Image (cartoon, rainbow, N blue to C red):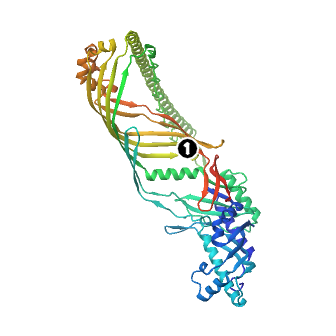
């Protein structure tokens, strides 16, 4: 066995695993995905009836030892020829005759290197190395069905044990929890198109179409580091933006496992705020990574929705009662406080520089250079008269220089004073205009306020008059019965133009391009009741109308605050959603509907004067009566109870309770596995 499978050096493999983790951890400053799994829970996942029935393996015992994972597994199985497809006929006959029942223990160890991604052209790959340590089979007992040649039996059993080990490895490799595949490079999701049919019991049927552009995941697996401790297996991952360069880890000095463990746990606490991270099962994702992926996907996809709906014919019947006058509030809600700011904004500070730049220094040299030396025979000297003349000439020159300089300085002073006077005059004129403009503005504000207050008073007076009339009418009985039918169709389209989730995933801002239209057909029958009803309308009347409602193309702003409360038994997602106003066009508008309702005007002469042509002509200046309506923005609260989901590992009878927690840095999911009963 040793000749064919040489024993591995445990310490060499341990140091390889520690060194690779230390080098990767040096580059993994801001990990954004992390997880930790208790080895005891992993053993629970392995100790399943399904695995025991297929392989005869049970009693998995896992332990970590300074970056290496060791396992001891109990074997108790009766072998048959059918367990080994391709076995030669003689060995198959021996096996079926002996029916060996083998009981023993399998022991093996494994190390795993940490790694960073490498790029080759457009291809991004990340490579992990498995470090197999040893693989042994200890036989406690072999039970045979009949007497046999032990030499031949031993050869067959030795062959079977080797093949059985291969079979065990094959079964383990097929289990989902032992095979983890994470692409290092990019993945593209093609253009999405889907249609959904919607219906309810109220007669509304709809079809929703969704179209989204192709998207490419905005991150790649840049680096991954592993830690195997005594009782846990942990991983740190950096999913980096695609435009970030791949890491180039540098060799690090020999590191003790205790130092590696401290650096690893410090990274977890710093980036995921998980205390005692090696003591429980958990998976964490940083909020910033969630925001990065969501924002990138939304920007690339820019989904568009097309909603087509129809309303089947609906009947209605309503008795119209004259409301009590106490339901009417005549206090005007109009605020007449002027909001215009009359403070002048122009700046009257002069910017002209009046400093004079002329240089008045005189450069003439008044020094007299002629010679006054004379000689009388052998006696020479300066002529006094000549020297006096030189001095007088120099004095006259210096006096002329001083005069010119004084004249120049006087001119500079005069020019500066003139400039300053002109500057001040312009500033004063500017201030005068500012004062005048402010006064005119304040006068206009006062006039606008007076007009507003007058309109308020007029509305209140008209309301009080109508209120008193309503009080008297209400005493006379009901007004009428209104019966009718309505049906319609509509279409609404909206596309996402912008979407931004904050890095703390606590705020959302979105912008939609929205437009739509709808049509409705209505039939109304009006039947007057009681005294007041017949006074208003002496006869029944009916009216059929076709109305079109258009939602012109416009932007819809949506903003929301988001919070997740995990303090109670169940996690609660709360949002406060606000939308901007929308404009809607109704054709024909209310004015036109009334104006063309000849049946109503003929049947109700008592109120016909209220809708005369003059009144309707005036009403056309009111947008709402023209059919130009504004739908005010909505503000809604959303509260979703996330509950306590459970994990069911299909086919293995394992269940686990999952808990959510959200801290300032990450979203964390934790839980435990329960062994099958």
Image spot of residue 44 (x, y percent): 69, 62
Left or right: 470 in relation to 166: left
Quarter assignment of residue 116:
bottom right
* Crowd class of label 1 (few under 14; some 14 to 19; many from 20; radius 10 Å): some
Image spot of residue 305 (x, y percent): 40, 47
Image spot of residue 124 (x, y percent): 53, 67
Which residue is farthest front?
Answer: 146
Image spot of residue 195 (x, y percent): 39, 51
The residue under the point 42% across, 49% down is 303
The residue under the point 43% across, 50% down is 302
Q: How many marks?
A: 1
Above or below: residue 280 compared with residue 474: below
State the residue in front, 102 or 473.
102
Classify the position of the N terminus by image quarter: bottom right
State the residue in front, 207 or 209.
207
Q: Secondary structure at mark 1?
A: loop
Left or right: 390 in relation to 591: right
Above or below: residue 532 compared with residue 81: above
State the residue in front, 440 or 95.
95
Quarter assignment of residue 552:
top left
Can residue 613 be seen here? no
Residue, disc 1: 372
Can residue 442 be seen here? yes
Left or right: 498 in relation to 176: left
The residue under the point 42% across, 39% down is 556
State the residue in front, 307 or 557.
307
Quarter assignment of residue 55:
bottom right
Classify the position of the C terminus by image quarter: bottom right
């Amino acid at each position: 066995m040793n000749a064919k499978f040489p024993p591995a050096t445990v310490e060499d493999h341990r140091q390889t695993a520690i060194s690779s983790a230390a080098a990767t951890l040096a580059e993994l400053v801001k990990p954004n995905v992390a997880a930790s799994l208790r080895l005891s829970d992993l053993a629970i996942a392995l100790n399943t009836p399904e695995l025991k029935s297929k392989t005869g393996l049970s009693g998995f015992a896992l332990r970590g030892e300074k970056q290496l994972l060791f396992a001891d597994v109990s074997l108790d199985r009766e072998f048959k020829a059918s367990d080994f497809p391709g076995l030669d006929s003689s060995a198959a006959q021996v096996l079926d005759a002996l029916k060996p029942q083998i009981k023993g223990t399998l022991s093996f160890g494994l190390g795993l290197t940490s790694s960073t991604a490498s790029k080759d052209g457009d291809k991004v790959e990340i490579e992990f190395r498995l470090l197999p340590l040893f693989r042994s089979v200890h036989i406690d007992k072999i039970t045979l069905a009949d007497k046999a040649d032990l030499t031949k039996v031993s050869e067959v059993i030795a062959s079977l044990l080797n093949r059985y080990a291969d079979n065990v490895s094959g079964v383990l490799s097929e289990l989902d929890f032992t095979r983890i595949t994470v692409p290092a490079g990019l993945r593209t999701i093609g253009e999405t198109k889907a249609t959904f049919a919607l219906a309810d019991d109220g007669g509304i049927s709809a079809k929703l179409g969704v179209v989204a552009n192709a998207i490419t995941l905005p991150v790649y697996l840049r680096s991954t580091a592993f830690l195997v401790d005594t009782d846990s297996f942990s991983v740190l991952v950096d999913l980096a933006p695609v435009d970030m360069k791949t890491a180039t880890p540098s060799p690090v000095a020999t590191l003790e496992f205790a130092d590696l463990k401290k650096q690893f746990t410090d990274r977890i606490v710093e980036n995921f705020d998980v205390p005692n991270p090696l003591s429980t099962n958990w998976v964490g994702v940083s909020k910033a990574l969630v925001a990065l992926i969501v924002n990138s996907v939304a920007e690339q996809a820019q989904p568009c929705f097309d909603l087509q709906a129809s309303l089947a014919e609906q009947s209605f019947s309503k008795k119209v009662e004259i409301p009590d006058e106490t339901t009417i509030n005549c206090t005007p809600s109009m605020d007449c406080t002027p909001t215009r700011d009359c403070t002048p904004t122009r700046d009257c500070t002069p910017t002209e520089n009046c400093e004079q730049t002329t240089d008045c220094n005189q450069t003439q040299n008044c020094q007299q250079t002629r010679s006054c030396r004379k000689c009388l025979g052998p006696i020479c000297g300066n002529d006094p008269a000549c020297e006096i003349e030189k001095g007088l000439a120099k004095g006259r020159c210096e006096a002329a220089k001083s005069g010119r300089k004084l004249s120049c300085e006087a001119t500079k002073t005069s020019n500066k004073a003139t400039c300053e006077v002109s500057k001040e005059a312009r500033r004063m004129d500017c201030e005068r205009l500012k004062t005048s403009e402010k006064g005119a503005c304040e006068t206009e504000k006062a006039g606008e306020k007076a007009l507003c207050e007058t309109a308020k008073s007029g509305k209140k007076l008209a309301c009080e008059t109508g209120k008193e009339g309503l009080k008297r009418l209400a005493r006379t009985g009901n007004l009428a019965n209104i019966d009718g039918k309505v049906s319609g169709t509509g279409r609404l389209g909206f596309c996402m133009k912008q979407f931004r989730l904050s890095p703390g995933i606590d705020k959302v801002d979105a912008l939609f391009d929205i437009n739509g239209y709808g049509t409705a057909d209505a039939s109304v029958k009006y039947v007057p009741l009681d005294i007041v009803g017949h006074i208003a309308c002496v006869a029944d009347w009916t009216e059929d109308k076709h109305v079109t409602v258009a939602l012109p193309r416009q932007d819809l702003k949506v903003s929301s605050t988001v919070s997740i409360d995990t303090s109670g038994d169940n996690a609660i997602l709360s949002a406060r959603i606000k939308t901007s106003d929308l404009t809607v066009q109704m054709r024909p508008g209310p004015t036109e509907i009334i104006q063309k309702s000849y049946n109503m005007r003929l049947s109700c002469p008592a109120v016909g004067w209220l809708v005369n042509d003059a009144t309707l002509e005036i009403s056309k200046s009111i947008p709402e009566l023209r059919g130009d309506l504004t739908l005010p923005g909505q503000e809604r609260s959303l509260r979703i109870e996330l509950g306590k989901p459970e994990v069911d590992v299909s086919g293995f009878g394992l269940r686990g309770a999952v808990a959510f927690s959200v801290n300032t840095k990450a979203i964390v999911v934790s839980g435990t596995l329960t062994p099958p009963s």
